[in-house]
Image (tube, rainbow, N blue to C red):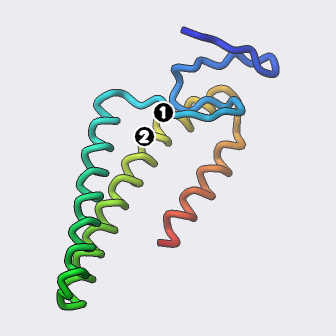
Amino acid sequence: MNHEINNEVQINEDSCCSSSSERKSHHSDETKKNLITRLNRVEGQIRGIKGLIEKDTYCDDVITQISAAQAALNGVAKMLLETHMKECVAERIQEGDLEVLDEVLITIQKLMKK
């Protein structure tokens, strides 16, 4: 494991979301695979919507497909948020970093606007 000393706090680079200046997530292989699978489906849905528009498909049918793609993308966001809260946020709170709570609240507000 590679450790870095930053402001007298030891940061484990294998943690979910480090609090160093370069923030990264470190999800399990299973989580990554699930997220990528879901995103591949969303990508396919978007290509399908593009094809519907190219074929002059009835607008209501296209809108229905757009709604399905948005729901699928929201599912990815929910999964990421859950993992972030259970791993990254919990870890940073244990380290005494309470600013992470403000960050999470802003993120939730962004998700709720959609």
Q: Which residue lies at the image location 27% right of the left edge and 40% below the top edge?
A: 34
User: Most extreme residue toward the right, as rendered?
Assistant: 7
Image x and y of residue 48, in percent? 21, 68
Say which quadrant the N terminus sits in: top right
Q: Which is nearer the eye, 22 or 44?
A: 44
Residue type of the residue flagged with mark 1:
Glu
Crowding at label 1, few (<14), some or many (≥20) Cα neighbours within 10 Å? some
User: Residue 55's x, y, as percent?
Assistant: 18, 83
Tag 2 secondary structure: helix
Q: Residue at x 39, y 53 (%)?
A: 78
Nearer-the-camera pick, 6 or 57: 57
Residue 74, by quadrant, is: bottom left
Which of 99/31 is in front? Answer: 31
| Residues marked 1 and 2 touching at CB (< 8 Å) | yes
Q: Residue at x 32, y 44 (%)?
A: 35
The quadrant holding residue 46 is bottom left
Q: Amino acid at mark 2?
A: Thr
Q: In the rendered image, which residue does mark 1 sit on? A: 87
Image x and y of residue 49, in percent: 25, 73
Q: Is residue 55 left or right of residue 107?
A: left
Compared to 1, does 98 lie above or below?
below
How crowded pointer 2 is (Cα within 10 Å; few <14, some 14-19, many 20+) is rated as: some
Residue at point 56%, 64% (across, down): 110
Q: Tag count in the figure? A: 2
Is 5 placed above or below 61 here? above
- Find the residue positioned furthest to the front: 54
Q: CA distance from mark 1 to mark 2?
A: 6 Å
**Pointer 2 residue:** 83
